[in-house]
Amino acid sequence: MKILFFVSSMHAGGAERVAATLASAWAARGDEVVLVPTYTKKGSLFYRLHPGVKLLWLADRMGWMGKTWFASIRKWFAIRRVVKDIQPDVVISFLTNVNVMVLLSTRGLDVPTIVCERTNPAVSSSAGKALVALRRRVYPWATLVTVQAQASVETFRAMVPGIQRLAVIPNPLPPELAQAFTGRPMPTDGQRRRVVAMGRMVPIKRFESVIHVFAALAEEFPDWDLYIWGEGPLRAALERQVKEAGLEARVFLPGRTAEPWRELAQADVFVLASEVEGFPNVLLEAMALGVACVTVDCPSGPREISRDGEDALLVPLGDRPALGQALAELMADPVLRDVLGKHAAVSVRDRYELEEIVRQWDVLIADVRGLKSQEVVV
């Protein structure tokens, strides 16, 4: 099978990591995969790819960019030419802006096209008004549209009523992580414990709530520290909050890490307090590593990933007392942490391992290629 895969860039990012994982998996089994980052300034390759993946930078096909409107025209021609040259069995595209351009560029070429939303479009503000209008116009042209969580389906149908076929397919666990977990040791006496959060320091991640809740628990749990990994525009505000709470020796903001799984594996408890998520990879990965997790029930992903709170403590969005109570419950009980973490690891590995997600992709691709008569089931 020949797969042509468009993504915005290959910088560090969730969509880029999933694109690299899927492309490499398909190439490893013998499919012909061409991965095309559409970023006009080219950029660099952050994630490792299987040697069988052909990386084609769209910027190399575009030449001089000129003004913004002219660059868009050149991108349209470049994408269309790539599709004609490669003649793929299926085109797959990630991210709204890339999806819109790919659908405009492939119009009339009679190639099956799957476009993939990487956030919950009903609550995400990443797409401006013009892009939202274009999405509403061109998404019905796609052979298939995918979202990452069941919670996104009905609201997205209402936002883009012309979509003919819509399917849910989640992110896979990276195979490297799947090989890393062999079980977590029980904590030893005298060892300092860690609550860990991770993500970009922006308002929707609500790290200020995590610090507020931890501050309220700090006296009761003197052997616990809080680590928040990441960078972003709210760093200074979060640092002030830590200082005002007098917790400089207990709350740490160490920045980005090149080894997020290593840091997640050091956690005794992981906490996610976001206002909104598309599909929170960091929660999925913490659970897969056997870490006991507390997560808010935000749209979308945590409820599905945790199986309605069976595999992680699920608390109402915006309820700080409930978040504090859940954290305190895990911080106070090492046996509960151990049992919950082990159950979480088994559960998410069974549902989100790469082999299973690739199997789901194969069903969708076979359907859009007309190899099956059944309709896509949402």
Image: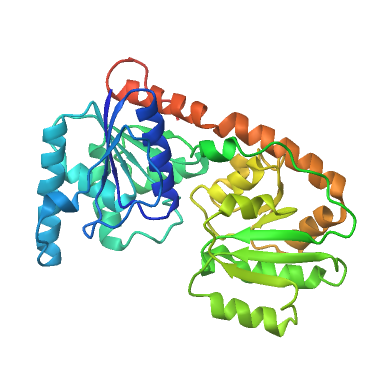
Q: In the image, is 263 to the left or to the right of 126?
A: right
Q: Residue 374 at x, y = what percent?
A: 37, 17
Residue plotted at (73% across, 81% down): 245
Residue plotted at (22% across, 48% down): 57
Going by the picture, which residue comes out furthest to the front? 51
Q: In the displayed structure, would residue 118 be above or below residue 198?
A: above
Looking at this view, is 319 or 223 the one in front? 223
Q: Residue 264 at x, y = what percent?
A: 64, 52
Q: Residue 164 at x, y = what percent?
A: 31, 33
Number of numbered markers: 0
Residue plotted at (11% across, 34% down): 84
Image quadrant where residue 191 sits: bottom right
Residue plotted at (33% across, 15% down): 372
Q: How is the image coloured?
A: rainbow
Q: Residue 314 at x, y = what percent?
A: 70, 49
Q: In the image, is 123 to the left or to the right of 305?
A: left
Image quadrant where residue 32 sits: top left
**Quadrant, the N terminus:** top left
Kindly tell me whether residue 284 is visible in this rendering. yes
Q: In the displayed structure, would residue 110 be above or below residue 265?
A: above
Q: In the displayed structure, would residue 343 be above or below residue 299?
A: above
**Quadrant, the C terminus:** top left
Kindly tell me whether residue 273 is visible in this rendering. no
Q: In the displayed structure, would residue 378 be above or below residue 5?
A: above
